[in-house]
Image (cartoon, rainbow, N blue to C red):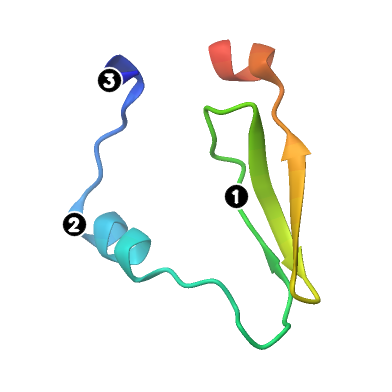
Amino acid sequence: MFAARQPLDFADYLAWQNFQLPEDGSSLELPRVSSNHFRLAAIRDHQRIYEVVNQAAIAA
């Protein structure tokens, strides 16, 4: 798990730290960054949309 970590520069860290999910019902598509079996893919109409992550693609 620790070996798979990616370094962040300060600008990326601030963007990650300040990120907020929408609270007004607007849509948001999230990037495909996950090492888990499922990921939060989007938020639409106050609903979280999850999808299965292809584990073979993560291992590559």
The spot of residue 28 in percent (x, y) is: 68, 68
Q: Amino acid at mark 3?
A: Phe
Which residue is depicted at the point 67% across and 12% down?
56
The spot of residue 34 in percent (x, y) is: 54, 35
Q: Please tell me how crowded label 2 is: few (under 14), some (14-19), or many (20+) other residues with Cα within 10 Å.
A: few
Query: In this view of the protein, which residue sits in the foreground, 34 or 8?
Result: 34
Query: If you read the primary sequence from the N terminus, does the residue marked by circle 2 or circle 3 appear first?
Result: 3
Is 47 displayed left or right of 13 in the figure? right
Secondary structure of the residue carrying numbered label 1: loop
Query: Label 2: which residue?
Result: 10
Q: Residue furthest right?
A: 45
Q: Nearer the viewer, mark 3 or mark 1?
A: 3
Q: Amino acid at mark 1?
A: Pro
The spot of residue 14 in percent (x, y) is: 26, 65
Query: If you read the primary sequence from the N terminus, does the residue marked by circle 1 or circle 2 appear first?
Result: 2
Whether residue 60 is visible to the viewer of this picture, yes or no, is no
Query: Label 3: which residue?
Result: 2
Which residue is depicted at the point 61% across and 83% down?
23
The spot of residue 41 in percent (x, y) is: 70, 50
Query: If you read the primary sequence from the N terminus, does the residue marked by circle 3 or circle 1 appear first?
Result: 3
Whether residue 26 is visible to the viewer of this picture, yes or no, is yes
Query: In this view of the protein, which residue sits in the foreground, 8 or 42?
Result: 42
Rendered view: 46 above or below 54 = below
Q: Please tell me how crowded label 1 is: few (under 14), some (14-19), or many (20+) other residues with Cα within 10 Å.
A: few
Which residue is depicted at the point 60% across and 50% down?
31
Q: Residue furthest bottom?
A: 24
Query: Label 1: which residue?
Result: 31
Residue 41, labelled with which disc? none
